[in-house]
Amino acid sequence: MNAVADLLPRNGVAHVVGATTPALWRKTIPAALAETAAAFPDRDAAVFLEQGVRWTWVEFAAEVDAVAAGFLKLGLKTGDRVGIWSPNRAEWVLTQFATARLGIILVTINPAYRLAEVEYVLNKVGCAALVTAAAFKSSDYLEMLQTLAPELATATPGALKAAKLPSLRAVIRVGAEKTPGMLNFADVAVSGDAVDVAALDAITAMLQPDDPINIQFTSGTTGAPKGATLSHVNIINNGRFVVAAQRFTHADRLCIPVPLYHCFGMVMGVLGCVASGAAMVFPSEGFDPEATLKAISAERCTALYGVPTMFVAQLQRPDLKAFDLSSLRTGIMAGAPCPTEVMKRCVSEMNLADVTIAYGMTETSPVSFQTAADDPLDRRVSTVGRVQPHVEVKVVDEHGQTVAPGVQGEICTRGYVVMRGYWDDPERTAEAIDAEGWMHTGDLGVIDAEGYCNITGRVKDMLIRGGENVYPREVEEFLYRHPAVQEVQVFGVPDKRFGEEVAAWIVPRQGQTATEDDIRAFCRGQIAHYKVPRYVRFKTELPMTVTGKAQKFKMREAMIEELGIEVEQTA
């Protein structure tokens, strides 16, 4: 690791450069898995508690090879795209590594997607095959696919020809039941049981570390989803450095309740474990606070991942102290701004003394900043840490000029983490990555004189009230100090006099009460008058994405409707 001085802002501006040691891995994902399986053959690799599945590293590698051989028999080849549409299941992780073994690009599909979204994604990248769960929560995946491709009813499994999904040849469903026109995942794996490892090795040997291996769709607030295209080097290194910041070894056991389709689960979780030899423990298909706490206790997990709302859900349980969390040591809270008070409670009530905060985005593989176990507590609860190894970050103003330390601006990231681009979308790629290789994140932040970063909001989230800039994150952090506030989101709504007004939606803490006037009184004299929420509403829950990001646009739309505000239409 470089000396601390190398992580400090350079030349009096907010520009930091990560350590250059240890060296980047120039290897593929299947090569990394093979090394780990050879080093720790009999240690736990993956535990799926809901399915009753437990594999050692050598068993896991053999299962991966069987699925890869099955894919090969279906005619899938290097460079093809294969989608995965499923909650957290053993088949998901097998598909992740079986595709990587053959150089097939894995397309991770949000389990919450519906008809129009899944049709768009499958066609945008030209998926040749899709591995799908039967259903999850309120989503009936098989029914949606039969609606999109009625030709499945009479198709030979593996030879689909569908008008609406012209690239899709094979639908591989999870579970024992048979569905017309679809293959069963278990049958595909069995078909590859007599696997010719030499044939797989020959294909793997031809793969290059910079080849694309994963496409993750990012929703954004406007426009169609964009397919961030990531390479072996992008994601195996990021997983490796993320767990290094938590001091992982092969003796660690990571509880992964975050969704696999997102970088948090499949890169920071799964690939981090492959890079270190640590065990991955999946409590359930979807996040369930009780299942997560049970998994930590039963499997003696040493680390826990989650978005802030997941940690809040566990902290809220009245029986929290009934679970043995003594094995916990570290983990990551990320995916959304991490409230300081929640972080402090995780340390004091969940035994997460070394828990870290991470920041990044899908387009940067994802992590570019992370706190360290030896950072002072105040830094670990109030910042996202320092820049990761082999990553360069600067903060720029609206004119693209690098600002001074302590000054807010847009975060721009450069280095091995930056995606190859948005799949088949050179225009939007050029908008995001400039000619010098800087990824413009759209996030507002500050880098202080010691190189610590604080995320202050989104460029597009900022609201302007009467000519004053209001950054929702700043107001949210203040409101978290109120004893009745469990969760809060601040956003703007149109106002004829001031242009915009400040609104706050609050989920009250159990057993606590407050009125709208109480909240406003709490703010007065403590924060500038123009930051005090004019509108305060109490809610049982807040609209969130699957990954725990607040959907402020939904809150804004609901408030506009409730208040009867007429929004001027722009041409």
Image: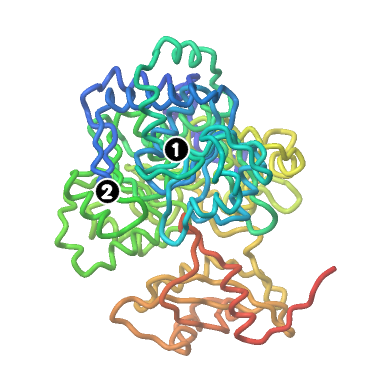
Q: Position of residue 94 (x, y in %)?
A: 39, 33
* 276 over 520 or under it: above or below: above
At numbered mark 2, what does the secondary structure look like: helix, strand or loop?
loop
Q: Which residue is mark 2?
A: 50
- The image quadrant of residue 308 is bottom left
Left of 535 or right of it: where is 25?
A: left
Viewer-proximal residue among 145 and 60: 145
At numbered mark 1, what does the secondary structure look like: helix, strand or loop?
helix
* 237 over 466 or under it: above or below: above
Q: Nearer the viewer, mark 1 or mark 2?
A: 2
Q: Position of residue 558 (x, y in %)?
A: 59, 77
Viewer-proximal residue among 133 and 345: 133
Quadrant location of the C terminus in the rendered image: bottom right
Graded by Cα atoms within 10 Å as few (under 14), some (14 to 19) or many (20 or more), the crowding at tag 2 reads: some
Graded by Cα atoms within 10 Å as few (under 14), some (14 to 19) or many (20 or more), the crowding at tag 1 reads: many
Left of 506 or right of it: where is 219?
A: right
Q: Position of residue 239 (x, y in %)?
A: 43, 34
Residue drawn at (58%, 76%) of the image: 531
Distance of label 1 from label 2 (alpha carbons): 22 Å
Residue drawn at (63%, 55%) of the image: 116
Which amino acid, by three-letter code, is at mark 2? Glu
Q: Which residue is mark 1?
A: 267
Q: Position of residue 430 (x, y in %)?
A: 74, 40
Viewer-proximal residue among 120 and 461: 120
* 9 over 224 or under it: above or below: above
Callout 1–callout 2 Cβ contact below 8 Å: no
**Number of callouts:** 2
